[in-house]
Image (cartoon, grey):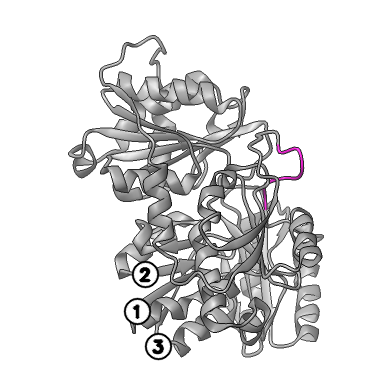
Amino acid sequence: MAGIFKAYDIRGTYPDQLDETTAFRVGYHFRDLLDEEDLALGPVVVVSRDMRSHSVPMARALKDGLRASGVAVIDIGVADTPQNYFGIGFLGASGGIQITASHNPAVYNGFKMSRRDAIPVSYETGIAELEKLVIGSEVTTDLPPQAGEEERSVFDEYCEHVLAEVTTLEPHLKLAADAANGMASIYLPILDKLNVELVPLYFELDGTFPNHEANPLKHENLVDVERAVEENGCDLGVAFDGDADRAILINEKGRAISADIITGLLAPRFLREEPGATIVYDLRSSWATKEAIEEAGGVPLRERVGHSFMKATMREHNSPFGGELAGHFYFRRNFTADSSIMTVIEVLNHIRETGRTLSELVAPLERYHSTGEINFRVEDKEGMIRRLADIFSDGEIDYLDGITVQFEDWWFNVRPSNTEPYLRLVLEARSCEMKDEKKALLLTYLGTPE
């Protein structure tokens, strides 16, 4: 059971690693993570679930545990993770829990947890404590409820909230969207109001993911939407992950655009409204992202990987917008939470307002050459990071997340995965030749990519 408690959520295979008893105990002990301000709002927790068949019994057990501890439940039903965040803020709840395993295969399930105002619960801010409580718990699942349960849809309000981001609906555009049989399937009523001709792929909710894995970071999962863009002459494509908190955008030529480039593209839109504001980006992002923020008069702020770190830093600096290489985009006006559909709307806004294609818009930002993120299975992660620090000691080194080494013409970051047994490499250079040369050099130390 101990292995299911991750950096940002609880996640494991059902039912051997994660079952209804565990779900009940997670619900029962969740109250212990709430502070006085959280509890003053109820205590009441928003619960929702994704489309996996076992999310139904897991949700029931979780809610029973919450109620047994005296926490009331507002069940908003089948929902994407961003809708759970919205529900917490909109309903003024003490917190929220989404039952989902995001992009993981069908056998997985889990819990993404937040406190009031959609403040994320990470390993450092509560999951570690919850791990001790749940593993040591002797609570039985037959405890009677001490608080009530209410079913309450917030979908109409959520749609209204998201559609408030639309600045223009002209001209009419064509959009290919791949929901991967995941929670983005529920976005059809929103997409219907965006004045787009939709080319939908896999918009049937199916937690077995019959068409492809719901992970848009793997290129094999983008092939279908890339082809749909090309064959249908679309202006834009998008691929969502399983719980629809991430989005990867595809240009009109059928090519995926790295999410850090999209951060650099969208940041000036927020800086127009708030000159001098801080824009937060994760440390895997291109030099071009930082430079785009500076050129637009903003303050670029580099942060370690992970939504809990990004959101905390954005709150601290009152940042209106932030983005991560993994396809998370964060909006202050969305309770400083990520929203894939709001990202799509912002990109549509930008294309329409400028009258330019996405490939034209991002071309100035694609001036460097990146490897993307590469995984390596390394037994002694800390030892490898120390070794790299010795080898590349002539560079500018920092340890914000793993090790980042910067030179005048290239840089790299190697960091331990927070969710998998890997070291992850991102490397960028001013030329393609240098990128390939330095990548080959790093591989001599890190080994063969997974």
For mark 3, what is the residue? 297
Query: What residue is at 38 percent from the left and 55 percent from the top?
Result: 161
Question: In front: 266, or 4?
Answer: 266
For mark 2, what is the residue? 320
Magenta segment main secondary structure: loop
Question: In front: 311, or 205?
Answer: 205
For mark 1, what is the residue? 273
* Amino acid residing under circle 2: Pro
x and y percent of residue 245 in the render? 53, 52
* Distance between the alpha carbons at the discs numbered 1 and 3: 11 Å
Determine whether 137 is above or below 338 in the image. Answer: above
Q: Which mark is residue 153?
A: none
Instruction: Locate residue 61: give its quadrant.
Output: top left
Mark 1 crowd level (few <14, some 14–19, many ≥20, 10 Å Cα): few
Contact? badges 2 and 1 (CB < 8 Å): yes
Residue stretch in magenta: 209-215
Q: Per the image, is 211 magenta?
A: yes
Residue 4 appears in view = no
Q: Is residue 392 left or right of residue 401?
A: right
